[in-house]
Image (spheres, rainbow, N blue to C red):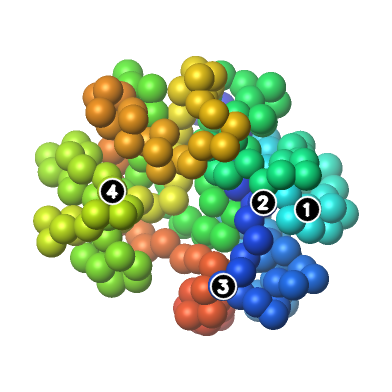
């Protein structure tokens, strides 16, 4: 079986939508069904045969490091890259983590639980021969505002700011990319801008996932994810 790429988890945000719960605790450590959210996330990655995780942390990141440690109790090797005094944004956080991520890696948001086939995603990326791949889900505006036009396996439009009725898909929250994508990116860049540029260059592949995503970035999301785990 192919060795799976490392996973960069973006867990440096301020989680303002979940205040006051996140004033003194990072979103990754919110208790969900008896365990911090990140425990569920890391267990899922290990179940998918991921071996290495790089946590890109910022706000209250020391608490995440104290809880997860070196990752060995989850069967993983975990490294940490801290934003520093200034929040870098999603693209900047990845750029700073490149030395420990290697040439090719997955990117996952720190509040996302994505029960999909990670090996299938990796194989789709390798087959695409493009610089990056974004997973998409036929959301139809159901769980969040759809932001992608996707047809015949291709992403036609990706735009979080200017949405249209033709957008029936949403970015699922998992991508694969080569490190070269971020070499020229600014340390203050946003991932969405990086993906839009790749799309213009015909270097962003798309791969459809059929399992819905879960997230703990909102109170509704926490409730739905808790129900999912209890089932």
Q: Which residue was labeled with disc 1?
A: 61
Can residue 79 be seen? yes
* Of pointers 4 and 2, the one earlier in the residue sequence: 2
Q: Is residue 33 left or right of residue 84?
A: left
In whole angstroms, how far apart are the C-alphas of marks 4 and 1? 30 Å
* Of pointers 4 and 1, the one earlier in the residue sequence: 1
* Of pointers 3 and 4, the one earlier in the residue sequence: 3
Q: Residue at x 60, y 54 (%)?
A: 110
Q: Which residue was labeled with disc 4?
A: 159
User: Residues at badges 1 and 3 in contact (C-beta under 8 Å)?
Assistant: no
- Residue 127 at x, y percent in the picture: 31, 23
In the depicted structure, whether residue 149 falls above or below residue 93: below
Q: Residue at x 61, y 69 (%)?
A: 16
Secondary structure beneath dot 2 equals: loop
Camera-near label (4 vs 1) is 4
For label 1, the crowd category at 10 Å Cα-Cα, with few meaning under 14, some 14 to 19 and many 20 or more, is many
* Of pointers 3 and 2, the one earlier in the residue sequence: 2
User: Residues at badges 4 and 1 in contact (C-beta under 8 Å)?
Assistant: no
* Of pointers 1 and 2, the one earlier in the residue sequence: 2
| Figure quadrant of residue 60 | bottom right
In whole angstroms, how far apart are the C-alphas of marks 1 and 3? 18 Å
Q: Which residue was labeled with disc 2?
A: 12
Q: Which residue was labeled with disc 3?
A: 17
């Amino acid at each position: 079986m192919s060795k799976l790429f490392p996973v960069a988890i973006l867990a440096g945000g301020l989680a303002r939508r979940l205040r006051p719960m996140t004033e003194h605790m990072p979103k990754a450590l919110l208790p969900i069904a008896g365990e911090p959210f990140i425990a569920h996330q890391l267990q899922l990655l290990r179940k998918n045969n991921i071996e290495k995780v790089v946590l890109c942390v910022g706000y209250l990141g020391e608490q995440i490091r104290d809880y997860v440690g070196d990752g060995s109790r989850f069967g993983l090797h975990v490294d940490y890259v801290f934003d520093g005094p200034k929040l870098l944004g999603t693209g900047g956080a990845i750029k700073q983590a490149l030395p420990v991520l290697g040439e090719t890696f997955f990117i996952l948001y720190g509040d996302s639980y994505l029960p999909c086939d990670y090996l299938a995603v990796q194989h789709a990326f390798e087959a695409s021969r493009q610089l990056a791949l974004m997973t998409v889900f036929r959301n139809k505006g159901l769980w969040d505002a759809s932001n992608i036009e996707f047809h015949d396996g291709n992403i036609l439009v990706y735009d979080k700011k200017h949405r249209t009725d033709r957008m029936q898909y949403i970015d699922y929250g998992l991508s694969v990319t080569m490190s070269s994508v971020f070499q020229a990116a600014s340390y203050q860049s946003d991932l969405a801008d990086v993906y839009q540029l790749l799309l213009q260059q015909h270097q962003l592949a798309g791969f459809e996932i059929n399992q819905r995503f879960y997230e703990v970035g909102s109170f509704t999301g926490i409730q739905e994810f808790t129900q999912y785990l209890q089932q």
